[in-house]
């Protein structure tokens, strides 16, 4: 009886050694940073994005310190403008979007049973672009050269070189790196979801996380180009004096607002849906049953994505656009609440039907839902144009968007952190500390 | 902590009668306040409802809800009820977007946002325009049309007690039709981030009885009689009149013709005392960073005081 080749232990060992060699991460002080494995790059990505969040959080603390008493002279007006511009820009471009890409780069191959994403070097390229652009933008505040025109950078305040300094160029050029890295990650994730599934896993059998990532990545591909186009026009106006946004020479400042918000509104859902995707993974686990209504969730996610491209003008209700178009965008802004409600109720009925295990991740999910519902309902309020004319550009909107982002992005990320930590490190995070941290967050809120 | 802050803020808003959307003195702000109350109560009810459903959901024993029941609940609570509520909200709220009716006879007030002050031009029908700055007077009970624009950067014109805000965008003229229904002195602010002193860009709004408004408008056509003293000479010699008009003409900086009767100095930020005015002349950037007016730090304080006194006394 002849043995099969594969039955020879020495041969198998040699094969395994060769395989390990091929997949061995590069070593050495410099070469280790040339690694392209999704686990490594993903962890760098997460840590960097988390670092930027802490940095922007400190900026917010300095702002609150300044605002604690009237006529405070803790920071001057110029620094304050840099602080809030950088806080918004860093949280949006250097934390929320990259964090979703980072988490997906780690999780997606594991969920799809793939060795890696289809273009590992593209992931690494995206990460390094993100790091360079991010350090460039956030470092500018140490040289008193940070952008100071608000995270929305409305021209003409920001395009007139006599009114705004180097900061506006730093914003445009630095964040172009982030745009490149986001588009790179989007391509990577779309191809990853579509091409790297194991045999037999059809689209309608994928884990919901993969569905959400597919939807969000497609959104990035459509949402970022208008911003990139706007950036190019913006820099051409600043550097070459081509008056795209200068009304006195035939341009229009509103052009920027359209380009910015047709990116900016889908952006909100780009950072919100991946967090809901984490819910879709952990809620069934802690309800001890499968999620009810898989097709509903998928359709709701696609519907949210589709609608989110048709409501950017609600950021421009006070710009004097024709009332009939405001009515259209008002209706669309309210309509987007419906797929969101469907997703929330799918989670609630899953908990209802199952047996709830009060784990730390579920605790965070519950807190996040409570906060997000307030954010969502205030969102419906500002979608009503006449109310928005009063609430627009006030603390009402500031509160609304922070409720949405903390409930819809930050807290779900914490839930995901406690849920997926063992997958990455092999150890479980402390439940006691997790619960303490949760109650601290809720209490300070 | 946060809750007590919110309560304090609400109480403070209750006390603030001159710059608050919760203390309306105009038709639009009044109807928006009603709408706000409905929206707040509706949002509270829905938030509590979702919380109650969530509470029931996590307390329910396993298997209490089967698949079909769960999907019915998603259909009703997630899709049908929100659709009905939101449609009703739209149908009820959108007609409020309709602007007040206006005619060609209405008083038009042209306001231009500048870094960081307001250029105001009253354009009554059939009369020559009247130029002013940093203060808007309107007659109660009459429709007034604001024509809003800007030349340097985007500003936003917001009188919370009167109506919602409207952006002032270079190259565009936006219209805001308002009708005040209560006399008094109120405050408006710039609501679009416009640079260093954005937070210091405000103006006074004085809602007057129609008769006294007409009288004020007629009286304001005559430039005030000014003494030709030291203040006048210094004003001319220091070049102040290169930017500031004293006769109601077009000027680069804010018109100072009726400076004496204004209730605030520097676009709604300082009490218009002689001392404050003199300090503003010598160093405008201390109270208003980024203002376009150059500093006159070399001017002796006595001279600045003389100019300030002279400007003040010329008002009626």
Image (spheres, grey):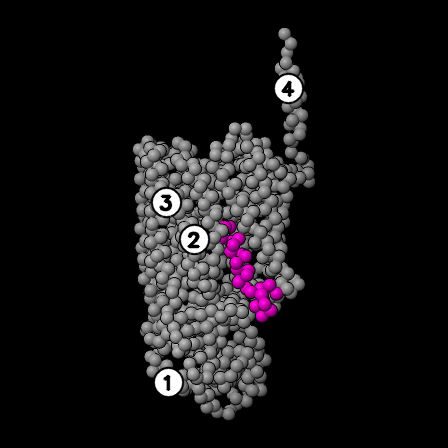
Residue located beneath label 1 in the image:
B215
Residue located beneath label 2 in the image:
A332
Question: Which stretch is magenta?
Answer: A243-268
Q: Which mark is residue B256?
A: none
Cα distance between the residues tagged 4 and 3: 57 Å
Residue located beneath label 3 in the image:
B79
Cα distance between the residues tagged 4 and 1: 103 Å
Residue A50 position, x and y percent, is 53, 45
Whether A424 is drawn above or below A330: the answer is above
Residue located beneath label 4 in the image:
A12
What secondary structure characterizes most of the magenta part? Answer: helix
Q: Are marks 3 and 2 on the same chain?
A: no
Where is residue B138, by image quadrant?
bottom left
Q: Is residue B211 left or right of residue B193?
A: left
Mark 4 vs mark 2, foreground winner is 2
Circle 3 crowding by C-alpha within 10 Å: few under 14, some 14–19, many from 20: some
Q: Is residue B74 left or right of residue A40?
A: left
Q: Residue at x 56, y 54 (%)?
A: A226
Whether A60 is drawn above or below A278: the answer is below
**Disc 3: host chain:** B
| Between discs 4 and 2, the one toward the N terminus | 4
**Disc 4: host chain:** A
Mark 1 residue element = helix
Mark 4 vs mark 1, foreground winner is 1
Q: Residue at x 32, y 36 (%)?
A: B69
Residue A440 position, x and y percent, is 41, 46
């Amino acid at each position: 009886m002849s043995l099969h080749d594969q039955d020879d232990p020495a041969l198998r060992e040699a094969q395994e050694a060769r395989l390990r060699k091929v997949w061995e991460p590069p070593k050495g002080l410099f070469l280790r940073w040339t690694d392209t494995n999704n686990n490594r790059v993903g962890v760098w990505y997460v840590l960097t994005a988390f670092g930027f969040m802490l940095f922007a959080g400190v900026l917010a603390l300095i702002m609150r310190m300044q605002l604690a008493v009237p006529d405070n002279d803790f920071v001057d007006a110029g620094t304050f403008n840099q602080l809030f511009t950088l806080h918004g820009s860093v949280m949006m471009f250097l934390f929320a979007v990259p964090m979703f890409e980072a988490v997906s780069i780690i999780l997606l191959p594991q969920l799809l049973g793939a060795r890696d994403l289809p273009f590992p070097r593209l992931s690494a390229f995206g990460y390094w672009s993100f790091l360079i652009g991010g350090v460039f933008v956030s470092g500018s505040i140490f040289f008193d050269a940070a952008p100071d025109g608000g995270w929305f950078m409305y021209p003409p305040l920001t395009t007139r070189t006599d009114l705004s300094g180097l900061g506006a160029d730093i914003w445009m050029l630095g964040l172009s790196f982030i745009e490149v890295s986001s588009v790179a990650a989007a391509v990577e994730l779309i191809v990853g979801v579509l091409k790297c599934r194991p045999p037999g896993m059809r689209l309608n059998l994928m884990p919901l996380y993969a569905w959400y990532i597919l939807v969000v990545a497609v959104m990035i591909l459509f949402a970022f180009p208008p911003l990139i186009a706007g950036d190019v026009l913006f820099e051409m106006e600043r550097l070459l004096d081509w008056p795209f946004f200068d009304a006195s020479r035939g341009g229009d400042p509103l052009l920027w607002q359209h380009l910015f918000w047709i990116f900016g509104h889908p952006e909100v859902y780009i950072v919100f849906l991946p967090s809901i995707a984490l819910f879709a993974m952990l809620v069934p686990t802690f309800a001890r049953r499968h999620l009810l209504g898989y097709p509903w969730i998928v359709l709701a996610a696609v519907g949210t994505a589709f609608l989110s491209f048709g409501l950017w003008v609600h950021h421009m209700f006070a710009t004097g656009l024709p009332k009939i178009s405001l009515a259209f965008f008002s209706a669309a802004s309210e309509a987007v609440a419906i797929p969101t409600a469907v997703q929330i109720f799918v989670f609630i009925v899953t908990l209802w039907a199952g047996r709830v295990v009060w784990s730390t991740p579920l605790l965070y999910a519950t807190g996040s839902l409570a906060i997000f519902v307030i954010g969502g309902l205030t969102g419906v309020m500002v979608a009503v144009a006449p109310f928005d004319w009063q609430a627009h550009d006030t603390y009402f909107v500031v509160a609304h968007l922070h409720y949405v982002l903390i409930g819809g992005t930050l807290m779900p990320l914490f839930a995901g952190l406690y849920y997926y930590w063992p997958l990455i490190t092999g150890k479980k995070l402390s439940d006691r500390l997790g619960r303490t941290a949760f109650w601290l967050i809720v209490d300070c809120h | 902590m946060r809750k007590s802050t919110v309560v304090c803020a609400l109480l403070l808003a209750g006390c603030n009668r001159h710059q608050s959307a919760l203390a309306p003195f105009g038709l639009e702000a009044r109807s928006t306040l009603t709408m706000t109350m409905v929206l707040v109560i509706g949002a509270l009810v829905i938030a509590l409802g979702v919380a109650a459903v969530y509470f029931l959901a996590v307390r329910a024993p396993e298997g209490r809800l089967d698949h079909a029941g769960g999907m019915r609940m998603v259909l009703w609570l997630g899709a049908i009820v929100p659709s009905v509520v939101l449609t009703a909200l739209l149908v009820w709220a959108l007609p409020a977007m309709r602007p007040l009716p206006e005619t060609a006879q209405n008083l038009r007030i042209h306001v231009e946002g500048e870094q960081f002050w307001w250029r105001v031009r009253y354009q009554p029908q059939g009369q020559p325009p009247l130029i002013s700055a940093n203060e808007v007077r309107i007659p109660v009970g009459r429709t007034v049309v604001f024509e809003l624009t800007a030349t340097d950067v985007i500003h936003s014109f917001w009188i919370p007690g009167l109506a919602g805000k409207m952006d002032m965008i270079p190259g565009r003229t936006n219209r805001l039709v308002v009708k005040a229904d209560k006399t008094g002195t109120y405050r408006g602010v710039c609501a679009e981030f416009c640079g260093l002193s954005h937070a210091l860009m405000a103006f006074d709004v004085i809602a007057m009885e129609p008769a006294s408004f007409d009288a004020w408008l007629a009286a304001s056509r005559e430039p005030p009689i000014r003494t030709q003293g030291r203040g006048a000479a210094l004003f001319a010699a220091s070049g102040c009149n290169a930017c500031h008009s004293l006769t109601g003409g077009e000027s680069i900086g804010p018109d100072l013709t009726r400076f004496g009767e204004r209730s605030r100095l520097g676009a709604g930020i300082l009490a218009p005392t002689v001392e404050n005015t003199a300090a503003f002349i010598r160093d405008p950037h201390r109270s208003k960073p980024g203002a376009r007016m150059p500093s006159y730090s070399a001017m002796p304080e006595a001279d600045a005081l003389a100019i300030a006194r002279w400007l003040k006394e010329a008002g009626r």
